[in-house]
Amino acid sequence: MPTSQHKNLKQWDRDYIWHPFTQMKDWFRDEPLIIDSANGVYLKDIDGNTYMDGVSSLWVNVHGHRHVHIDAALKKQIDKLSHSTLLGLSNTPSIELAKRLIGIAPKGLKKVFYSDNGSTAVEIAIKMAYQYWQNTGHQKKTNIVHLSNSYHGDTLGSVSVGGIELFHKVYRQLIFKTIPLKNHGWPAVEELEKLLKARGSSIAALVIEPLVQGAAGMLVWPEGALKKMRDLTKKYNVFLIVDEVATGFGRTGKMFACEHEGVTPDFLCMAKGITGGYLPLAATLTTQKVFDGFIFDHKEQKTFFHGHTYTGNPLACAAALANLDVFQKERTLAKLAPKIKFLAKKLKMFYNLPVCADVRQKGFMIGIELKGRLEDRVGAKVCQQVRKYGVILRPLGNVIVLMPPLSISVEELDFLVMATYRAIEENGNEKQ
Ligand code: PMP
């Protein structure tokens, strides 16, 4: 690409784009890094520099960029149909994918409702849970319970069940009332039990991020807590909504986090990795019982009145089908296990750095928490520094996140960890 064209792109980015989750005043201080192409676990910018994609392009990429099988599946689908609607019609890839998803999901989930991002997948589960109780004569079951520090997306419904002060407090007047749990870990389970005992008949659902609270800083749950929450919600007739938007599609070492504890939720929300990181697609899976709670004569007006324009988009569904093929063909999950072990060993070295407060890992979800005040933005500085070593990372406050594509090799993982270590050593240790 000629240099003048680069200059134009950098200027036009400044002129026209409002970047998400970005203080644009800060953005204007630096040159924008503009990605132009990719291959495997690497991204290439318009100046020809190559970077390892250390956070899987915001936690979505699974088998690497430009995977031949997914690329081919998309090209084939483009030659047949790019979009048609699921409102009043159906289409081939969305049917095939729904069957495949039910085949790999925890046993007991039977129906697939599509949307196009993680926030909507969660909102749909909340609306379905709420309406189920309304439809079936339990008018008092209206409350939604969630964890503290929870994150389920940025639309107002998912913000309502969010508990991250920095992101959510400004919208307090706009969102619906919920019951947040105050505690973490086992104390949260105890708190839930008390709450359900006292008020279970007025509670519609509990929403959780299973095993790892991602945006909260990769907080890993204690073993057994998920199963206990499932048992409690069952006992008190409250739906369990599990948000596997971040944890799904192999991230924790199994296809879904629920599998670690043999849990079948009433709703399982998936997005991000569903298409291997190619296209926006999400799905909310639920049970026959929930589905049956919406089967009435039309005149009773108990239909689930919800649907997005691109629901079940054939291109996205074709990518998702190809993604699942690759999981099978390349034995992605079997190959992941030794890489997870390698990481667990390797990550211990971060404790040698005085600035390191904690290292958390569940499978391929890693958070390295650094000491220091949030306003010093040590996380952002480390992520800026690591670019010099050819790695793209994005922090969560003071937590450095490592979430590489599952396809990454052990040698590449080693490089990623060492580059991160060096960046923290050179930058993070300054501020204590
Ligand atoms: N739930 C969880 C657990 C997430 O991590 C995210 C996004 N990081 C979302 C929901 C929202 O997904 P989206 O950005 O696709 O709306």
Image (tube, rainbow, N blue to C red):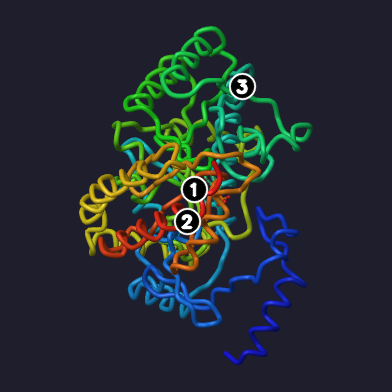
| The C terminus lies in quadrant | top right
For disc 2, the marked residue is 426
Q: Are marks 1 and 2 in contact (CB under 8 Å)?
A: yes
With 399 as the anchor, is 65 left or right in this view?
left
Name which residue lies at 46% across and 47% down. Answer: 246
The three-letter amino acid code for the residue at tag 1 is: Asn
- CA gap between label 1 and label 2 equals 6 Å
Which residue does the numbered mark 3 point to in the structure image?
A: 179
Q: Given the image, on which type of amino acid does mark 3 rest?
A: Ile
Q: Is residue 336 above or below residue 354?
A: below
Of 28 and 244, the residue lying toward us: 28
Q: Nearer the viewer, mark 2 or mark 3?
A: 2
Q: Residues within 10 Å of mark 1 (few under 14, many from 20)?
A: some
Question: Marks 3 and 1, how far apart in space?
Answer: 39 Å
Horizontal and vertical percent for residue 217? Answer: 50, 40
Reply above or below: 40 against 384: below
**Residue underneath mark 1:** 429
Residue 273's tag is none
